[in-house]
Amino acid sequence: MSTLDELCSNLPVDPLPPTRKRNPVIPHAPVRNHRLNPTEQKLAVRNALRYFPPATHVELAAEFADELREYGHIYMYRFMPTIAMKAYPISEYPSRTKTAAAIMHMIMNNLDPCVAQFPEELVTYGGNGQVFSNWAQFRLVMHYLAEMTDEQTLVMYSGHPLGLFPSTRHGPRVVITNGMVIPNYSSRDHYDKMFALGVTMYGQMTAGSYVYIGPQGIVHGTTLTVLNAGRKYLGLNDLSGKVFLTSGLGGMSGAQAKAATISGCIGIIAEVSYDALKKRYDQGWVLEMIDDVDRLVERVKTARLNKEVTSIGFHGNVVLVWERLAEEYEKTGELLVELGSDQTSCHDPYSGGYYPVGLSYQESQDLLASDPQLFRQRVQDSLRRQIKAINSLAERGMFFWDYGNAFLLEAQRCGADVSARDDPTGLKFRYPSYVQDIMGDIFSLGFGPFRWICTSGLQQDLEVTDRIAQEVLESIVREGLPDNIAVQYDDNIKWIKEAGKNRLVVGSQARILYADQRARVTIALAFNRAIREGKVSDYIVLSRDHHDVSGTDSPFRETSNIYDGSAFTADMAVQNCIGDSFRGATWVSLHNGGGVGWGEVMNGGFGLVLDGSDEAHQRAENMLNWDVSNGVARRSWSGNANAIQAIQRAMAADPRLKVTLPNPVDETAF
């Protein structure tokens, strides 16, 4: 398969492509534990064969059964394309509408080996964040997009392209749902079975909605978190000589090393997979690699003494680092870490999201495949050991927070000492969520991870958009802002000024910027004008992380600072998706899972294509205002002061917006 035209020509079945094996030199997803009985295994194969004509079934059935037995899922490796997987310039895609070509650009970026965690298993990040469930789905989607007109909508059911349906040019071109499971069946065990059967999948947040932009997607938010943690916990604006210890360098968590150096501290990021560590080192995101814990301690002491700014990738289990630093304190009284967190894929700890101490990466993979119950026990033991060491250091002055990856939740479930002492509900932890303590109030002001992608693939287009975004922010500041909003603008202006020199791009020419409602809309309209005037050479895709002010309902992360009892409701995420769809989004998505795990969260996302037209101007204005105001209004109703301030400013700017505001409650009345 040597050209994009051939790739998009349809599912090749006559003749079938030759069989293919997994590439042994790239990382692969762990073996999935499906626990299907023999009858269900036959059903899984039968489900997979539906994509192919009967004449191929004898040959494919045995192959698919072997994949299910060996890998726990039918990936259809035979149908992997041979063309280099990357985001090609939009003009190179065969299509009847360039809007569809923009979506193809985004899909292939999600599966670029430089970007994706396990590209041959169609996993973008988070251990199990799928773009599609198998390669037949990928090929069919690319074909449908190549054939699509502006009066059709592609409907996606958990990776499966249900088909192209008549629509209007004003509606979304793609509507995506992932993991929409009846609530009583939204458990991990049910997920494992349904994924193996090929009837649902875990889209994470931006993987299954085609808007992942590589590890830079959370660098900005991670940087803001580390900076504000230093301000809040240490009382410092300068973090030089201070140590931030965390773990995980796959996918999203690769951002931690870059955020540490941007924040000016010493970052230690432990990673059990050498391939994942080396990938980030080769990309310049990790500056040093060490595989001996004693040598790591000596290196940290030197870096602290010299107030170096660096990121050290430790090849090994983070439990060893936490325990070694606790031991060092007991021996010498020297606290070698001030800030701590964890960013392993703990939303899926028993299927490769978290690896047990005492085993190498390969040994862990082998144990997971051969004895998943023992693997589970070893993971639980590791979580308890990790928390014990963290607690010891926290009692000495180290500040730890949960990074929203379900780390504390899973530690609590296995009996680790993480519950808050004064909480009879059992829902609070002794360490705060970074949303509760730092990012929640920023979200409530309407700030969040706004993103754009230059589909030309040209660096100069990205540089132009960086300058436009900076000019917009500076112009808004000059008009005057309340102090609590102005400080956010100052942080973001500094960020966008330095974005180019920080070498954040991996894959598509994309950028992230924390922006509030006014900034997002104004930047979008300025981009659209730049396309119309030829200052940017081709279309721009706008998006955001689902992890934002409006996108996600998650009681242990995004909505963990909502205290009116509604943290477990999901109206906001569902309304977000519905509202974006008829206000102008090019594609919309709604996912179960994402970030903190299957059954723990509901999240919605969008993609919006700017083409320089008046229609794109109207779509951006209508959709982006709603996309922020929805969440700010919900947070306002819960009583958040920042959100009340933000929604009142939004209503003053647009008299059509009328939001129900909470009245202050007289606490003496009951």
Image (cartoon, rainbow, N blue to C red):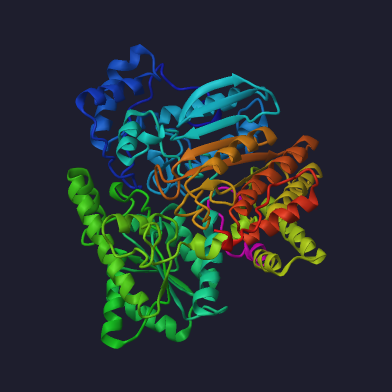
Residue stretch in magenta = 493-510
Instruction: Identify the residue at image location x=49%, y=75%.
Output: 233
How many numbered circles does the render carry? Answer: 0
Look at the picture and state if 101 lies above or below 110: above
Look at the picture and state if 365 lies above or below 310: above
Residue 17 appears in the figure: yes
Residue 180 x, y percent position in the rendering? 45, 33
Taking the image as shown, residue 427 lies to the left or right of residue 86, namely: left
Q: Is residue 505 magenta?
A: yes
- Front residue (pair 285, 450): 450
Residue 29 x, y percent position in the rendering? 33, 44
- Front residue (pair 13, 232): 232
**For residue 408, what is the image quadrant?**
bottom left
Look at the picture and state if 544 lies above or below 236: above
Instruction: Identify the residue at image location x=28%, y=55%.
Output: 355
Taking the image as shown, residue 596 lies to the left or right of residue 415, namely: right
Residue 8 appears in the figure: no
Examine the residues drawn in magenta and state their main secondary structure.
loop
Residue projecting furthest to the front: 669
Residue 439 x, y percent position in the rendering? 55, 61
- Front residue (pair 282, 177): 177
Q: Is residue 360 magenta?
A: no
Quarter of the figure that contains the C terminus: bottom right
Residue 584 x, y percent position in the rendering? 69, 35
Taking the image as shown, residue 397 lies to the left or right of residue 452, namely: left
Instruction: Identify the residue at image location x=46%, y=65%.
Output: 257
Residue projecting furthest to the top: 55
